[in-house]
Amino acid sequence: MKLQLLSDLHLESEDFEPRPAPGADLLVLAGDIDATWQRFERFAGWPVPVLFVAGNHEFDGRELRLAWPALRAEARRLGWTLLERETAIFEDRAGRRVRFVGSIRWSDFDLFGPARRSTAMRAAGYFMRLMQATRDGAPFDVEGVRAESLACRAWLHQALSEPARGRWDKTAVVTHFAPSIRSADPRYGQQAGTASFCNADDDLLPLADLWLHGHLHCRHDYQVPRAGQSPMRVVCQARGLGTKGEDLGFDADKLIEV
């Protein structure tokens, strides 16, 4: 199965016109597509199925508990498959079945271990103030993000531990937040704020064949060895902000095979 992966398009402010990649069987949108949701329409009538995992900016200025059902309704209207702590199986033209395991997977701020968690959470306060979202009527703060993230992590572990029993041939994970410090943006290195973008999910990586993510405004494509199996692959295909030159080297037509 050949995938087109797009994320961090920020169409609420960026001038970018998406187009179908020749040869793609599925389009994966890995979050931060449009904070206003208005430009989701650019993907209406897409020639192949669209799988969507939300990003943090899809919730800017919104109440989390109300935004999720509204976002689901919008995805349903557009004919997308939205995954949040859910799985879906797609079959390619050769009859191979790929299970997609999807969750936004918010930051748990444990990237550098529990001893540095409080520092990471303090650094994240800036991003949460920019987001201006609420959760159950209260500000969606770092404690709220961590609580949501831990629920995502627990679900991912359970889903990835489930045996295939012939139901699927490959497993691809889609998250918005990165699963490893290996996906850190090289411009900023391993500072406290990096824990707002990457999680330490390295132990989960061998349970998947492919892990797609966004959130970092840079591109990554690397392999992780697995004992007794072929290496798994991690890919980030984020466009980022053209106003900052982050789109340099971005290839919207890149195909990822699973």
Image (cartoon, rainbow, N blue to C red):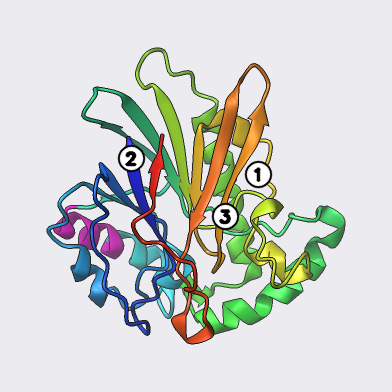
Which amino acid does the dot numbered 1 rest on?
Answer: Asp
Q: Residue furthest left?
A: 45
Residue at the spot 19% in from the left edge and 54% down from the top edge:
76
- Residue 238 in the image: x percent, y percent? 47, 63
- Residue 49 in the image: x percent, y percent? 21, 46
Q: Quadrant of the C terminus?
A: top left
Residue at the spot 72% in from the left edge and 72% down from the top edge:
188
Q: What range of the chain is rendered magenta?
A: 70-79
Dot 3 falls on a residue whose secondary structure is strand
| Residue situated in front as seen by the camera: 151 or 34 | 34
| Residue situated in front as seen by the camera: 27 or 111 | 27
Tell me whether circle 2 and circle 3 mark residues in contact (CB < 8 Å): no
Q: Residues within 10 Å of mark 3 (few under 14, many from 20)?
A: some
Label 2: which residue? 2
- Residue 64 in the image: x percent, y percent? 43, 67
Q: Is residue 108 left or right of residue 71?
A: right
Q: Earlier in the sequence, mark 2 or mark 1?
A: 2
Residue at the spot 62% in from the left edge and 63% down from the top edge:
197
Quarter of the view holding residue 195: bottom right
Label 1: which residue? 201
Label 3: which residue? 220
Q: Earlier in the sequence, mark 1 or mark 3?
A: 1
Determine whether 163 is above or below 241 in the image: above
Question: Could you tell me what secondary structure mostly forms the magenta stretch?
Answer: helix
Q: Residue furthest right?
A: 115
